[in-house]
Amino acid sequence: MILLAFLFIRDLDRIQTCNLLSRNQMRYSVAPRGLYFPQTGLQIYFFLNLPQNNAPKMMDLNTYIRDIKDFPKPGVLFKDITPLLKEPKAFAKAAEGLMKLIGDQAIDKVVGMESRGFFLGPILASKLGAGFVPVRKAGKLPSEKISKTYGLEYGTDTLEIHADSIVKGDKVLIHDDVLATGGTAKATCELVEALGGEIVQCNFLIELDFLNGRDQLKGKVVQGLLHY
């Protein structure tokens, strides 16, 4: 907006830059420019209003991650991603961010772990033009499979993958929602490599840095979008 003001004040130096606040609370910097005609004493000032700090704010995905205390057991602070999943723009932004972590690498298969690896894993596979392979808990897959049992803090767990889901030489992206202690990711990597897959990257929406899950994935490229 350009405001034209006709003023009859000789002293140009008395006019200083000022700030105006519009009705929508956007702040403007107003810089005067003027012409002085000595024959008539007429002075013409031009005020150019330029909006400041009006660049769109970047979406902060951290605001869509909810902390749940004492879940699934006392002493655990659970990172709940369901607020992110239900917001279309945040969900799309998360997928976009994960794709940037992958870059332009060729991927044949995206492997997602049960169950939260199934949320974004298929979307990444679709964007990459790759197939999606689920890794599931024992007894969930119907066809011929191979298994890997790994240790937990209390007891053990077993993951399985279909034996025909990956062929030798496939470029594989491992995806899950959270990298915590790294046991599940390590077991999944071992299943993929047992079938001859080549792991290009281990890719996570959230990485809990203080749990040092990367130590379980030495020799692998590990990328996390959000870090805590």
Image (tube, rainbow, N blue to C red):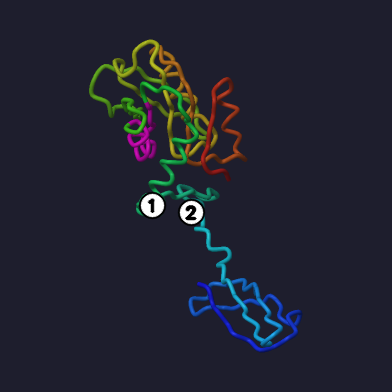
Residue 228, given in percent of the width and then of the height, sits at 58, 45
Is disc 2 placed on a helix, strand or loop? loop
Q: Which residues are magenta?
A: 110-125
Residue type, mark 2 in image = Met
* Residue 112 visible, this angle: yes
Structural distance between the alpha carbons of marks 1 and 2: 9 Å
Q: Residues within 10 Å of mark 1 (few under 14, many from 20)?
A: few
Task: Say which quarter of the image contains residue 193.
Answer: top left
Q: Which residue is mark 1?
A: 89
User: What residue is at 59 percent from the left and 78 percent from the top?
Assistant: 20
Q: Which residue is mark 2?
A: 59
Residue type, mark 1 in image = Lys
User: What residue is at 41 percent from the left and 51 percent from the top?
Assistant: 90
Query: 124 or 205, which lies in front?
Result: 124
Residue 213, given in percent of the width and then of the height, sits at 57, 32
Q: Residues within 10 Å of mark 2 (few under 14, many from 20)?
A: few
